[in-house]
Amino acid sequence: MVVNAPEFGLPEDRRMPTTTLEGWRRFVDEDPIAFDLLAVDDWKALGPRARDEYDEGRVNYHSELIIVETPTVRDVLHQGRLLTLVNRREISARRGLIVSGPWATGKSTAIKQLGRAHELRVRQRFPDHDRIPVVYVSAPPNGSPRKLATRFAHFLGLPLKSRHNEMDIADAVCEILTDARCDLVMVDEIHNINMATSTGKDLSDHLKYFAEHIPATFVYAGINVEREGLFTGVRGKQIAARCVMKYTGNFPYQAEWRSMIALMDDSLRLHHHEAGSLVRLAKYLHTRTGGSISSLSHLVRAAAISAIAEGSERITRRSLECIPVDHNTQSDSPRTPDDGDGEVGDAA
C-alpha cells in the first residue's frame, strides 16, 4: 500500500517553462501522472500525516488531470506529422502550419502535443543521437528582430553579449539547429506580429530568415491571426501562401463534448465519486463554460481539488457553482437556477 507522493511517482517540484531546452525536454519526458485510490478501509485507517501525504498526491494528480485529445489536437497531430514528412526532402519553400482561434481554445496545447509526439518518435528512431528535433518559442510582444533571435538563443541556452546583433545571434542559432537536425520549430503567440506596422514587418522578415535557414517545418499558433494583420501586405500574402490553416474554437453541445466529459469523469480520484455523475452534468457544464475546453478543464480540476480539501470527496452541481471560471466565460455564461438538491442539474 502506497500513500506518499514519491512512491506514486508524483512530481515534487513545479514544471519548468517549455521555452527552454531543459524545460521542453522535461515536458517531453514526463508521462501523465497515474494515481490509484486506496481501498476504503485502508483510506480510513490512514493517520494524519499519511492522510496529508496521500491527499497531496491526489492534489498533484488533479492539478494536471488528463489532456483530453480533442478533434483539434488529433487534426493538428495529423497535419503536423504529414507536413514534416512532405518537407523532409524539400530544399526551399517548405510548407508550414498555422493554428488560429479565439483565446483559451487549446492552440498551445495542440502544438505542444504535436512537438512532444514528434520528439518521442525521433528519439525512438535515433536513440543514440544527441538531436534537438523540436524548438518551442513564443513571438515577443512589440518585438524586434533581436528580441525574436534572443528567444531562440534563450531556448538553446546560448550566452549572449551586448555586442551581438540580431544577425550574429540568428546565424549562431541556425548553425546549431541545422547541426542538431532540428526538423520542427513551433512559434506561439504569432498574433504579436502585425504586418501593418514597420516593427511587425521587420519581425516577419527575420522569422522568414529562420524558416529559410533552418531545414525544419514551422508551426505557428496565435489568437485569430487572420484578423490581427498577419496576412497583410506582400509579406503576409507570402506567409498565407506557404501555410496550412487549422482553426480552433469552443465545442458545441454534441457527442464529442459528452465524450470529453466522460473521460474526465473516469479520471477523477475521489472516494465518494459516483461513476457517471459528471457526465450527467454535461449540459450544465457546457452552459457554464460556453463549450471552452480550457474553462472546462479548470472548473473540473478546481472542483476536484476543493472536494479533497473540504473532505466531501465528490463533485456536485452545487460545488461546481462555487468555483469561478475565467472572467470572459463568467461574463458570457447565463446563470442557471439550481435544482434544489445541488446534484444533477440536467438530464443529459
Image (spheres, helix red, strand yellow):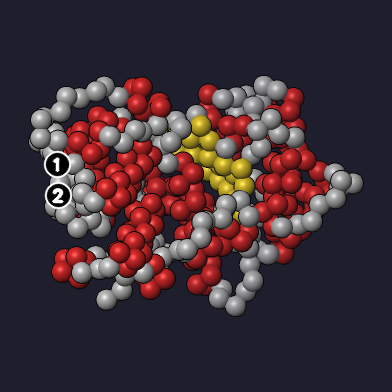
Q: Is 202 positioned to the left or the right of 112 in the image?
A: right
Q: Quadrant of the C terminus?
A: top left
Return the residue at label 2: 276
Instruction: Give the residue drawn at x 27%, y 30%.
Output: 288
Instruction: Give the residue drawn at x 50%, y 72%.
Output: 124
Tell which of 116 and 80 is nearer to you.
116
Instruction: Give the residue drawn at x 53%, y 70%.
Output: 123
Q: Quadrant of the N terminus?
A: bottom left
In the depicted structure, whether residue 88 falls above or below residue 75: below
Tell which of 254 and 141 is nearer to you.
141
Q: Residues within 10 Å of mark 2 (few under 14, many from 20)?
A: some
Residue 280: mark in rendering: 1
Residue 84: % across, % down: 54, 55
User: Do the residues bearing badges 1 and 2 touch, measured as CB atoms within 8 Å?
Assistant: yes
Q: Is residue 237 visible?
A: no
Residue 38: % across, % down: 22, 68
In the depicted structure, whether residue 245 falls above or below residue 259: above
Residue 262: mark in rendering: none
Alpha carbon distance from label 1 to label 2: 6 Å
Counting labels gives 2
Q: Name the amino acid, label 2.
A: Gly
Secondary structure of the residue carrying numbered label 2: loop
Q: Is residue 155 visible?
A: yes
In the depicted structure, whether residue 29 falls above or below residue 72: below
Q: Name the amino acid, label 1.
A: Arg
Residue 7, by quadrant, is bottom left
